[in-house]
């Protein structure tokens, strides 16, 4: 999404944004995100985002639910928000793509958002930050992703890479040219596009592929808008970048996904829903949402969470580009929800 659009929606409620933007479906599929100003004062002093949260008879709810976090989880939360608001028009659900870490640090743990999407588990440091602000995070696994490494469509020299080769490219002080990886590759410098360091995808890739003993390179174009990563790869023959599978599945004609193998001795695995579910794709990973336990006492937030967890098992998640949760996971999540909410 262009920068001017981000400025239009800064600090705005989701309903106002939808009126400006027009087509809601394009948002989830294209990966466009809303931005939220850090000095947004829409939350109440006690950390509650509700403007009342009362029921207006029957199952009609009112109030505000604020969601921040992972750009990978954003399309799921965005779709859940739209569908929930269709059923409960007096509830306004805002969804901002801030990155997993950016959401925890700047919004969720300070008590300024109700729910944070994350493409990796919450860290001990983030848990401590939340606890210091009397925020108790409740974890729910809602889907699986096949993190995808992509190159330009005109790249005809590579189809599969190992973890070690990707680590050499993406680590700090790593190799600079394609020919440094394999002699038969062209002597051209990499053009790298990827998440910012506030992203859970960045953290997961650094820990699991680059290696914790190395730092992630700063020699790349960082962004929390995954569609911009797609554009960068598409427009540069030597381009390379990584993002959640949903953004690849909605841009399959724009870039070329690489197969991946953990080591030279392993077979190449293709990113996809089936391979992620079967465990044959080495960059499969779980996706999470974290709820503020105290805010689950609010009817509108509790009902939204129940809706989200139940819908996470359905086809809409696979249509977005992720592996849905299964029946056992839904049952476990709903039980955890009721226990956290005291219901």
Image (cartoon, grey):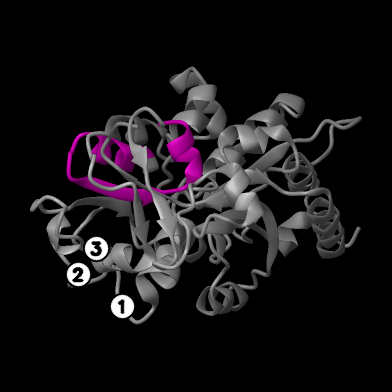
Within the magenta stretch, is there residue 196? no
The residue under the point 9% across, 51% down is 188
Chain-order first, disc 2 or disc 1: 2
Q: Position of residue 27 (x, y in %)?
A: 48, 29
Pointers 2 and 1 in contact (C-beta within 8 Å): yes
- The magenta region covers 227-251
Q: Position of residue 190 (x, y in %)?
A: 17, 53
- Between 146 and 104, which is closer to the camera in this rendering? 146
What residue is shown with label 3?
169
Q: Position of residue 159 (x, y in %)?
A: 33, 46
Pointers 2 and 3 in contact (C-beta within 8 Å): yes
Q: How many marks?
A: 3
Residue 53, located in which quarter of the rendered image?
Answer: top right
- Between 57 and 272, which is closer to the camera in this rendering? 272
The span from disc 2 to disc 3 (Cα, nearest Å) is: 6 Å
Q: Position of residue 249 (x, y in %)?
A: 48, 35
**Looking at this rendering, what residue extends furthest in the left direction?**
187
Instruction: Give SS at disc 3.
Output: helix
The residue under the point 45% across, 69% down is 208
Q: Is 111 left, or right, of 175 in this rendering?
A: right
What residue is shown with label 2?
174
What residue is shown with label 1?
214
- Between 96 and 226, which is closer to the camera in this rendering? 226
Dividing the image into 4 quarters, which one contains the C terminus?
A: bottom right
Residue 303, located in which quarter of the rendered image?
Answer: top right
On the question of residue 92 being in view, the answer is: no
On the question of residue 166 being in view, the answer is: yes
Mark 1 Cα-neighbour bin, 10 Å: few <14, some 14–19, many ≥20: some
Chain-order first, disc 1 or disc 3: 3
């Amino acid at each position: 999404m262009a920068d001017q659009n981000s400025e239009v929606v800064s600090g705005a409620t989701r309903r106002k944004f939808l009126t400006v933007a027009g087509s809601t479906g394009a948002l989830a599929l294209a990966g466009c995100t809303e931005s939220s100003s850090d000095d947004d004062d829409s939350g109440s002093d006690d950390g509650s985002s509700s403007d009342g949260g009362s029921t207006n008879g029957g199952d009609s709810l009112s109030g505000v639910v604020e969601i921040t976090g992972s750009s990978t989880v954003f399309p799921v939360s965005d779709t859940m928000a739209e569908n929930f608001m269709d059923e409960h028009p007096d509830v306004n659900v805002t969804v901002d793509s801030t990155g997993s870490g950016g959401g925890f640090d700047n919004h969720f743990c300070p008590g300024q958002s109700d729910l944070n999407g994350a493409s990796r588990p919450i860290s001990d440091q983030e848990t401590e930050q939340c606890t210091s602000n009397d925020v108790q995070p409740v974890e729910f696994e809602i889907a699986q992703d096949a993190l995808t490494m992509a190159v330009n469509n005109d790249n005809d020299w590579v189809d599969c890479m190992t973890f070690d080769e990707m680590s050499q490219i993406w680590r700090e002080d790593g190799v600079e040219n394609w020919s440094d990886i394999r002699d038969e590759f062209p002597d051209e410098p990499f053009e790298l596009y990827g998440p910012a360091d506030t992203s859970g995808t960045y953290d997961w890739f650094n820990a699991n592929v680059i290696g914790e003993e190395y730092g992630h390179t700063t020699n790349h174009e960082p962004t929390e808008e995954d569609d911009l990563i797609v554009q960068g790869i598409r427009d540069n023959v030597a381009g390379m970048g990584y993002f959640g599978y949903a953004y690849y599945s909605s841009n399959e004609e724009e870039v070329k996904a690489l197969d991946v193998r953990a080591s030279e001795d392993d077979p190449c695995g293709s990113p996809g829903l089936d391979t992620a579910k079967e465990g044959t794709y080495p960059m499969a990973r779980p996706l999470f949402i974290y709820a503020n336990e105290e805010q689950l006492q609010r009817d509108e937030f509790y009902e939204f969470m129940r809706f989200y967890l139940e819908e996470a098992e359905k086809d809409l998640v696979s249509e977005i580009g992720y592996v849905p949760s299964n029946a056992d996971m839904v049952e476990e999540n709903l039980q955890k929800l009721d226990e956290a909410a005291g219901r």
